[in-house]
Amino acid sequence: MKTERLIGILSILLQRQRVSAPELAEQFEVSRRTIQRDIETLCRAGIPIATVQGAGGGISIMEGYRVDRTVLTGPEMQAILAGLQSLDSVSGTRRYAQLMEKLSAGGSRLVPGSARMLIDLSSWYKTSLSPKIELIQRAIEQHHCIRFSYFSPKGESDRTVEPYYLVFHWSTWYLWGWCRTREDFRLFKLNRMDALAEGTAFAPRTAPLPDLAPERIFPANCRVTVLFDPCCRWRLVEEYGPDRFTVEPDGRLRFAGSFPDPDSALSWVLTFGDKAELLEPAALRERLGELAKALADRYGRT
């Protein structure tokens, strides 16, 4: 893809005094004309690139450019490329790994051969997630709407969205875009999308960055107090940290936390089975007792 190739060309120019167009064309497996267009794109982006024709000529960054060519150290470049390569774990391709291999060609000092940082952004839903990400990326680049069925606690709905950003947050992938149904910017979880399809072109509008503050996405509307069996300590530490609960005289763990709604709190407590006792709020405790009776009736039948 063009973006990765531009990054690759710029990285090479930062590392080397001069490089020829045929050499770049061979390294990135494109035509010399494509390399020329890429150089023009970099120039339009404000990178002062000089080209010299004839023997001993080539492509280089102009002398006196205010950014030092050594501004990126080996570890810094490796960290950047490790982040790029992590996207392969989502797309299921070797696109960024191949970019790293090309940048490493010739023993580049800025791209060490041994990576010490491995990032995997894949999930249990990789088979269905990768095609969605590829389609959304293409739609964002080409300014095309996307259509899909969306499943939420309020039910199923059909949406048409102008896509602007793919967001990886809270270990999950989201789409940030203008929802034509709600006439506002919305955050959509990719795993809740079905029948995703690319639609017609749209005129891009000014898109604010999504507000990903936890208190906005997960408002604290339902505060609970729960007592846990000591064997649940590992999970409380993993999910909330070691400072979010206290130890009772009998060894049980007292936890106080907030959830967006009672259903979310109830679902979470139930995942602990009989190792958790919900103390507050009283109304939710009563509701849990009624649910326990209903389950006992259902599964206690002979």
Image (spheres, helix red, strand yellow):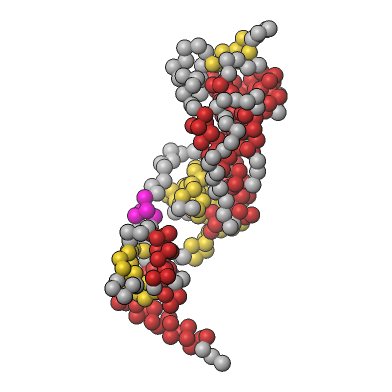
Residue 295 is situated, as x and y percent measured from the top left of the image, at 48, 83
Placement of 177 over or under 268, stated as above or below: above
In what quadrant of the picture does the C terminus appear? bottom right
- Quadrant of residue 293 within the rendered picture: bottom left
Vertically, is 37 above or below 132?
above
Front residue of 96/145: it is: 96
Which image quarter holds the N terminus? top right
Prevailing secondary structure of the magenta residues: helix
Question: Residue visible at 57% across and 15% down?
Answer: 17
Q: Is residue 59 magenta?
A: no
Q: Can residue 226 be seen in the rendering of this structure?
A: no
Q: Position of residue 225 (x, y in %)?
A: 31, 70
* Residue under the point 42% across and 49% down: 184
Q: Position of residue 29 (x, y in %)?
A: 70, 28
Residue farthest to the top, as pictured: 55
Stretch of the chain drawn in magenta:
213-217
